[in-house]
Amino acid sequence: MNTVEKVVALTPREGCGINPGALLALRGSDGCALARTTMGEALEDLALALSRVAQAYREDRFHDLREAACTVGRIAASLDLDRLARVARTVAGLSTTTDCTALAANVARLVRLGNGALGAIWELQDQIV
């Protein structure tokens, strides 16, 4: 007798830990255009750096992976995204080791957290404006 078991797809989810107060401070207390431009540029740079992390990992370019992860870490720290910055530092460190499993897991976590943070920040910006 053949029985088919139910297959459950697990989707990892983790909060990105955005501090709306810190984002407001970065944006500027008066909401000036310069602060909005600076915030927009930081988000664009973060998205680009996350893309570079993923591409460098797929292409086994570990030096580029380290540089991109360091960039993500710097931008995340400037946006007060501590968890994202910490994972980016972990990826940068693992990129010089032979622990392929840990690197793969942390790259996936970095991209997942980064995409979640970008989405949440853009939603907050829409509410603020």
Image: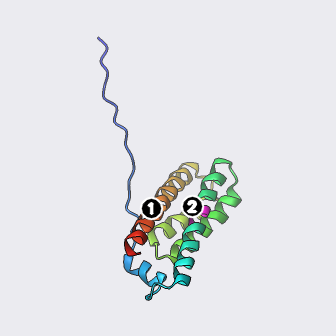
Q: Residue at x 54, y 72 (%)?
A: 40
- Point out the frontmost of discs 2 and 1: 1
Provide residue 15's location: percent of width, then percent of height: 37, 62
How would you rate the neighbour count of disc 2 (Cα within 10 Å): few for under 14, some for 14-19, many for 20 or more? many
10 drawn magenta: no
Q: Is residue 127 left or right of residue 46?
A: left
Q: Tell me the distance, in whole angstroms, between the alpha carbons under discs 2 and 1.
A: 21 Å
Considering only order in the chain, which callout, 1 or 2, is on the residue closer to the N terminus?
Answer: 2
Residue that label 2 marks: 91
Q: Residue at x 34, y 31 (%)?
A: 7
Q: Is 120 placed above or below 56 here?
A: below
Provide residue 76's location: percent of width, then percent of height: 52, 71
| Range of residues picked out in magenta | 46-50
- Farthest bottom residue? 30
Q: Is 42 placed above or below 68 here?
A: below
Q: Is residue 4 left or right of residue 64?
A: left
Question: What secondary structure is found at the residue carrying circle 1?
Answer: helix
Question: What secondary structure is found at the residue carrying circle 2?
Answer: helix
48 drawn magenta: yes
The amino acid type, in three-letter code, at marker 2 is: Val
Residue that label 1 marks: 119
